[in-house]
Amino acid sequence: MTLAPLTKREREIAVLAARGLTNKEIAASLVISVRTVDNHLSSTYAKLGITTRGELALVLGDRG
């Protein structure tokens, strides 16, 4: 299965989420809305074929 690459912003948000930050914390640190964070994470999960932050951390760890 070929997975779509993440955008720069999706990766940025994914890394913060994988580190354990909440969506609210991510939104505040990037000066964006929580809804925007939700949208980017949903897109990221779909592209990577995952459903949880735990899986996100594993995938990002495997990919560097």
Image (cartoon, rainbow, N blue to C red):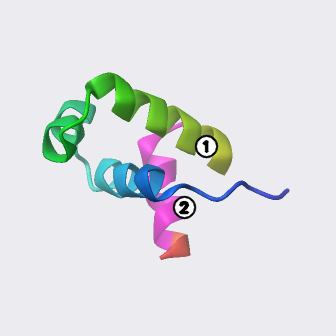
**Residue that extends furthest to the right in the rendered view of this protein:** 1
Q: Which residues are magenta?
A: 49-61
Q: Residue 27: percent from the left, percent from the top?
A: 22, 36
The image shows residue 54, relative to residue 22, as above or below, that is below
Report, in whole angstroms, how far the alpha carbon at label 2 lies from the one at label 1.
9 Å
Label 2 is placed on what type of residue? Val
Residue 49 appearing in the image: no
Main SS category, magenta section: helix
Position of residue 27 in the picture relative to residue 57 (left or right): left
Q: What's the mark number on residue 50? A: 1
Q: Residue at x 42, y 44 (%)?
A: 53
Out of 42 and 8, give the one closest to the viewer: 8
Label 1 is placed on what type of residue? Ile
Q: Secondary structure at mark 2?
A: helix
Q: Which residue is mark 2?
A: 59
Q: Residue at x 85, y 56 (%)?
A: 1
Residue 24 appearing in the image: yes
**Residue that extends furthest to the top in the rendered view of this protein:** 35
Out of 50 and 30, give the one closest to the viewer: 30
Q: Residue 5: percent from the left, percent from the top?
A: 64, 59
Out of 53 and 35, give the one closest to the viewer: 35
Position of residue 33 in the picture relative to residue 54 (left or right): left
The count of marks equals: 2
